[in-house]
Image (cartoon, rainbow, N blue to C red):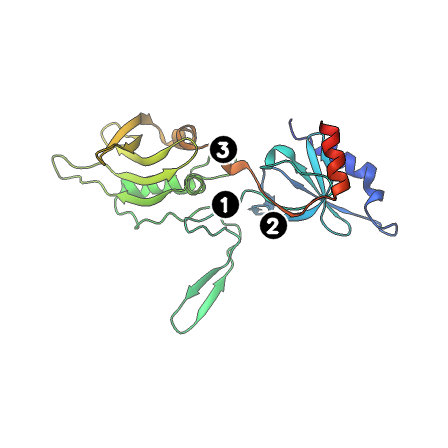
Amino acid sequence: MQFNEQAGRQWLSSHIWDFIPKNSKRYSTSILSLRRGSNCFGMQVDLPATEGKVIHAGAGFYVLKTDRIGFAVVDSPLLSQPLNEGATVRITPYQRRHFNGNTFSEPVVEDHGTYKTTVHKIGQNVSTIPVQEPKSLYTINMLELLRRGKCTDGIRLISNMLVDFNAHNVELQEPEMHKVNGCDPQFKFDCSTGKFVGHVIIGLNLGADVYYIQLQKTNAEGIRETVTTCSTVYFDQMAEVLETLLCDGAWKVAKVDVLKQEPKVKKHAAEMASA
């Protein structure tokens, strides 16, 4: 069912006096859906984890009571599992990450030898790709595309998506321009998604001036064999082609931790209603 944010707000407005103190003059509402929030500087940031008690379940959305006068309306398809009314849960929406697993909101500790500094970087959007700095114009342009190219979902960059692919053993290959059988500039990595597990090569055909993508699997003899090839990929198609070949959509699903089960009476009533 499609998320109806307005319906969630209307439900909360109609039932608000059942959940806040009588002397309260206001309440706050946040929205958990597949979109980013913004900080005080107007920069887009990932939504933080939200904890609260489920006070409404069904009709395409959930409502959590997060504190004395705080509430959150949650998009149902965002969740990895259904929520039961009365349960206390923690919902962690999609968080963009670096290749080391750290989210963008985590501070970076820099060791300067005699002292250490903790740096908070605000408004990050690029996942730092762990390769050596490119030397040729071809690999400079390729890496910049992979760092900052926009995905079709409107939320991620290609570098964020590579992290979601569980990309590892990442390698940037410089071109050999002055050899008879010189190699193309290539970006290589191993990945593991619900769509594909294996080796991926993103290369630039210097003669045709177009990118190509190869998916490889290791055979019984331990030799990599190409199983899929997209031979003509223009720079503005890179994100879409990678999504089509490798993205399984698992990144969209928020993590749900049940901190406290719903009361047994409500649980039994819910089971009887669904029978």
How far separated are the C-alphas under marks 1 and 2? 15 Å
Quarter assignment of residue 262 = top right
**Which disc number belongs to residue 223?**
none
Q: Is 247 drawn above or below residue 119 in the view shown? A: above
Mark 1 or mark 2, which is nearer to you?
1
Q: Is 5 drawn above or below residue 103 in the view shown? A: above
Identity of the residue drawn at 39% across and 38% down = 192
Q: Secondary structure at mark 2?
A: loop
Q: Which residue is mark 1?
A: 96
Q: Nearer the viewer, residue 217 or 125?
A: 217
From the viewer's perspective, tell me whether residue 180 is left or right of residue 149: left
Rendered location of residue 80, percent (x, y): 58, 37
Q: Earlier in the sequence, mark 3 or mark 2?
A: 2
**Which disc number belongs to residue 39?**
2
Identity of the residue drawn at 61% across and 48% down = 49
Residue type (three-letter) at the residue carrying disc 3 = Gly
Mark 3 or mark 2, which is nearer to you?
3
Rendered location of residue 139, percent (x, y): 29, 42
Q: Secondary structure at mark 3?
A: loop
Quarter assignment of residue 188 = top left
Identity of the residue drawn at 14% across and 39% down = 178
Q: Name the quarter where the N terminus is drawn.
A: top right
How far separated are the C-alphas under marks 1 and 3? 14 Å
Q: Earlier in the sequence, mark 1 or mark 2?
A: 2
Identity of the residue drawn at 42% across and 41% down = 148
**Which disc number belongs to residue 249?**
3
